Amino acid sequence: MLLVFALLIQIVFLGPALLVWSLFKWFRPNQFGVNPYLATLGCFIIGVAATFALNLEFEAGLFGGIIYFGVITFVLSIASCIVWFLYRVLRARSNA
């Protein structure tokens, strides 16, 4: 039961990251080749790996970890979109 609750809460906290990737795909449709769901999942996996690499202990237990995973996934999504956009702009400028 706790696992189902944690999964539902995680889906709610991954919503903003999925929104970032969906908006990025909407504004850059011809230059974007990654599925927003896979990009969100990739950012989530990187966030979980970063959390375990930093060996963080949460005061609120599992719920604190779920919130942290959602926030770090959102931050990684924004950073990845910015890096992707800058890469495309610099690549297009060097080809011109």
Image (tube, rainbow, N blue to C red):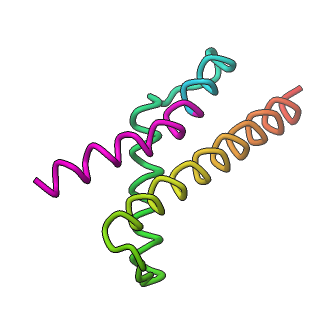
Q: Residue at x 63, y 15 (%)?
A: 30
Q: Is residue 25 above or below residue 2?
A: above
Q: Main secondary structure of the magenta part?
A: helix
Question: Residue 83, how many percent across, how many down?
Answer: 71, 46
Q: Position of residue 56 (x, y in %)?
A: 44, 81
Which of 29/75 is in front? 75
Is 80 left or right of 67, judged from the image as shown? right
Image-based side of 34 in relation to 5, left or right: right
In the image, farthest residue toward the front: 60
Q: Which residue is at the front of the view, 89 or 50?
A: 50
- Give the residue at x 59% y 23%: 25
Q: Which residues are magenta?
A: 1-20
Whether the magenta-drawn stretch holds residue 5 is answered as yes
Image quarter of the C terminus: top right
Where does the image place residue 14, in percent across and percent down from the top left? 44, 43
Query: Image check: 90 left or right of 28?
Result: right
For image coordinates 38% across by 59% down, the residue present is 66
Residue at 31%, 68% (x, y): give it.
62
- Image position of 87 with respect to 32: above or below: below
Residue sitting nearer the eye, 20 or 4: 4
Rendered view: 6 above or below 65: above
* Position of 90 relative to 63 (above/below): above
